[in-house]
Image (spheres, coloured by chain):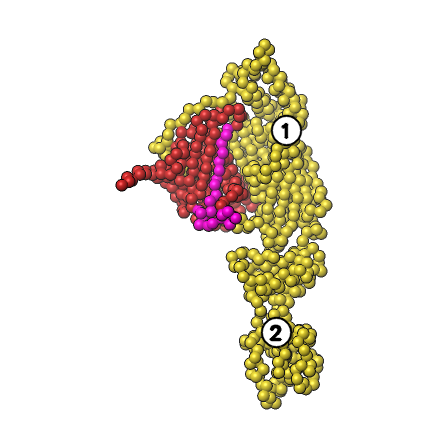
Amino acid sequence: MSTQYSVVSHRYAAPLGDREVIVEAGKLAMQANAAVTVRMGDSMVLATAVATYQPREGISFFPLTVDFEERLYAVGRIPGSFFRREGRPSETAILYSRLVDRSLRPLFPKGFRNDVQVIVTPLSFDEVHPLDTIAVIAASAALTISDIPFHGPVGHARITVDEVGRLIVNPTIPEYENRRLDLRVSGTADAIHMVECAAGEIERR
Amino acid sequence: MVEAITLAHEAMQPIIELQRRMREELGQPKMSYPVSGPDETVEAEVRAWLGTKVEELIAQTTSKEERNEALAALSQALQEAFTDPETGAPRYPVQDLAEAFQTVLKEAVRRRILEQDERPDGRHPNEIRPLYIEVGLSPRAHGSGLFQRGETQVLSIATLGTVGEEQMLDDLGVMERKRYMHHYNFPPFSTGEVRPLRGPRRREIGHGALAENALRPMIPPEEEFPYAIRVVSEVLSSNGSTSMASVCASSMALMDAGVPIRAPVAGIAMGLIVDEESGRYKVLTDIQGIEDALGDMDFKVAGTDQGITALQMDIKIKGLSMAILREALDQARAARLEILEAMQAVLPAPRPEISPYAPRIYTLQIPVDKIGKLIGPGGKHIRAIQQETNTKIEITPEGMVYIAATDEAGAQRARELVQLYTEDAQVGKIYTGRVVRVTDFGAFVEILPGVDGMVHISQLSDRRVPRVEDVVQVGDEIMVMVTDIDPEGRIRLSRQAVLEGWTLEEAREADRKGKGRGSDRGRNGPRGGDRGRSTPRGGRPKGNGGRRRRSR
């Protein structure tokens, strides 16, 4: 007779625009310093944060690595490659990794030289709710509840415009695709620190 | 833009609050860690030893190479000064000395900018480095543009290809294909370094994507310009803001290639120096390497004279105000307009013609139900056309046919053949066809590829014909007129009509009279054996169902 493993998941929810974001911790990947899953619609990612307990010697930069590990099972597809594995990161995955990295990096304390690795794995993608938004939130939440020093939490929001030029917060992929504005902003409670934007000739106003 | 950024910041607050709650309820105590870097005594001693040496050095040097050499020499002198003359061992860790030196350098550069409006290369905060712009550098490439801004130099090269050469994306993204591709390369020689080449790195992918976004809104739609476009930016020399230089160089390359972009796009990297104590700040236009490294912001803005097309910002300090952001955007706009003017002085608009070395692409629309016939069994027909005319042909599922050719004549011939394959027989029209089968009652003639009709024995000649074989043999080429197509698509032909020079009405009249004579080879007779070869032979090739585009 085996006994039931006791799994306690902590669930939190908050609105982002018109949609609900659900953050869970305590169930998955418990050997990481911290791990959370973030879900919006049927899109869901797992973010883990792990740090070494000793600083890396002889370097003059903060050794942070962020990897967004694309997995085609998230959309129920088998990769088309010869080995049927994901292989090298796609351009999208690299851009997502960079977005998360840029959202986190400024918030580590000065002089902190321990290796930190954040890995974001998409577990489900509904092709409606963008993964990059929840990837930033998940990575920040993992670092925030971990024992790794971090001056977060970091929030992230995407903004687009509708046909008549009204701003929409946290649009779905069909809502922001081919629109005149695709703006992504990361910030803390006090200020923003990262902006990424593709636009069709928009002025500053 | 500022409004949208403010809105985003407001919208993200609940998510931040959620994480705070999580931290309170689930958060682990933060680990302790040793703070790397020099302590205060080292820094104070280094500062004292350096005195005003660093500021003097910055004031005297302008080029990156000159400055780096002087800085290296000074750093070396510092290390020696802090070496115990008896033991030969450094009094402090070498790493700490180097970092303290960097701190003093950083402060000096920032102070000069904040207090004297004096940048490391002597520029004023809103001044752009000298520009040099050229197009057509590569004789064979379809378009090329060189853009140099101070010591930053980028060569962009554009290649035009067929729409089928666009990139297919097999990733988690939603966009499935990419017609405009921009690839950014940052080879080690651009900074005078030696480093093995191992394919594009993350930074290069990121810069490439940024410049791609900057230009994408200007790329004409496929219906107007049916080409796949690849632009490669080679950073030949780097001293900051190479991604924005690659935007400018790419605009030039695209215009040189004759891509009718709506307007050229220019990019500029803005910087910021803030004194957190006094709140004083300076927004810097066109930052170079050292200003990026020692400054508080890297803010890249690309756009046309009408507005912004791409933006990327990374801020190192806390609390960037919307007022600073506004000022930075205004200053970026002024710089952008200045650069656009310089670009348009070299090439005011896209060239009216694409390069003679680029494929010419001709489009024509065919009915969707003719796609299968044009392709032929296993691609037989389309391959034959491409081979004969030395062209490349692609067909979309919507029936758009793209013919890519390097010479006009081949394209014309291919166009004719495509039309021939997709043509329906027209009543009254005269065709030159080949006899494919002979029977007692007439001859079957292929008038269009895969389209047969029948000439009844009574219409085979202007004389009475005892036997079909007396007039035509299989393989003969004859001219025939289509006199009728019945509801089942069977085609009735007349050779006599051509020989007599009849109109359609006369030909039909003669046909009717022939039947009226009560011939036992009446209307139904001869058709009995014709199983409707007038419908297209073949059909769609196998194993192509899932693909979005056919290309062979």
Q: Is residue A67 magenta?
A: yes
Q: Which chain is yellow?
A: B
Q: Is residue B68 magenta?
A: no
What is the secondary structure assignment of the residue under circle 1?
loop
Q: Is residue B80 left or right of residue B176?
A: right
Q: Earlier in the sequence, mark 2 or mark 1?
A: 1
The amino acid beneath tag 1 is His
> Which chain letter goes with mark 2?
B
Name the spot of residue A163 as percent of width and height, x first: 50, 50
Q: To which residue does mark 1 refer?
A: B124
Q: Residue furthest bottom?
A: B518
Q: Is residue A122 left or right of residue B350?
A: left
Q: Nearer the viewer's eye, disc 2 or disc 1? A: 2
Q: Which chain is red?
A: A
Name the spot of residue B170 as percent of width and height, x first: 52, 48
Q: To which residue does mark 2 refer?
A: B452
Name the spot of residue B275 as percent of width and height, x first: 53, 25
From the image, give the main secondary structure of the stretch colored magenta.
loop
Q: Which residues are magenta?
A: A62-84
